[in-house]
Image: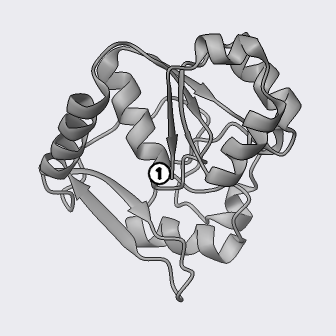
Amino acid sequence: VPVAIDAPIARLRAVAERVGARLVVSDRALDVERTLRPQDVADERVKFELDPNVTPGDAYVIFTSGSTGTPKAITVTHTQLAHSLASRLRFYGDDAVRFGLFSPLAFDSSVAGLFWTVACGGCLVIVDEELVMRPHETVDYLIRHRVDTYLTLPSVHRALLETAKPALAEIVKTVIVA
């Protein structure tokens, strides 16, 4: 279950308890004891077993933002994911892409780019949230990593266009604005 590392502790705890999290994977230091209260915290390899509460049809769980109250768990099945991915492949094609992922992994729009890129045999280029606030540097980053496809908010795309360099126009083939 992807979560934003900077989310309030109460939200992190609620999500972890709701899904029965037993393992935390993070690229940053996190006070796991204080935040998530796991039953076991280990620094060694973990043996994974199929959770009997997860049906074979479930692909992943993602939580809503909670803007209307408590975040809700949304379970996406393999069938739903397959249909979404098939539509994307029909519309955008299956050529390998270098996809610029602007959305945090805990945000549902990241899932589309993530699975599409993997299905195409492409490369996922994660654009740091703080970098997005500096359009000139973001454009340089996209050029340096040869990002040819990305999905972003209209306001971010507008800022990138205002600071774009000719080299970016030579690389980018597809921009999805939503």
Residue 133 x/y as whole percent: 84, 46
Determine whether, in the image, residue 61 is placed left or right of residue 58. right
**Which one is in front, 170 or 125?**
170
Percent from the top left, x then y, of residue 30? 74, 51
* Residue located at (56% from left, 48% from top): 24
Circle 1 is placed at which residue position?
Answer: 109
- The structure's colour scheme is one colour
Point out the residue furthest to the bottom here. 69
Q: Residue at coordinates 39% horizontally, 42% vertically from top-left?
A: 112
| 109 on left or right of 85 | right
Element type at marker 1?
helix
- Residue 41 in sight: yes
Considering only vertical position in the picture, is 137 above or below 42?
above
Badge 1 density bin: few <14, some 14–19, many ≥20, Cα 10 Å: some
- Horizontal and vertical percent position of residue 143: 72, 15
Say which of 106 and 177 sits in front: 177
Which of the 4 image quadrants contains residue 113? top left
Residue plotted at (35% across, 31% down): 116
Q: Quadrant of residue 119?
A: top left
Can residue 20 be seen in this snapshot?
Answer: no
Q: Is residue 67 above or below residue 8?
A: below
Number of marks: 1
Q: Nearer the viewer, residue 142 or 33?
A: 142
**Where is 155 relative to 121, above or below?**
below
Q: Position of residue 54 (x, y in %)?
A: 21, 57
83 or 174: which is nearer to us? 174
Three-letter code for the amino acid on which mark 1 is drawn? Ser
Residue at (64% x, 41% y) in the render? 26
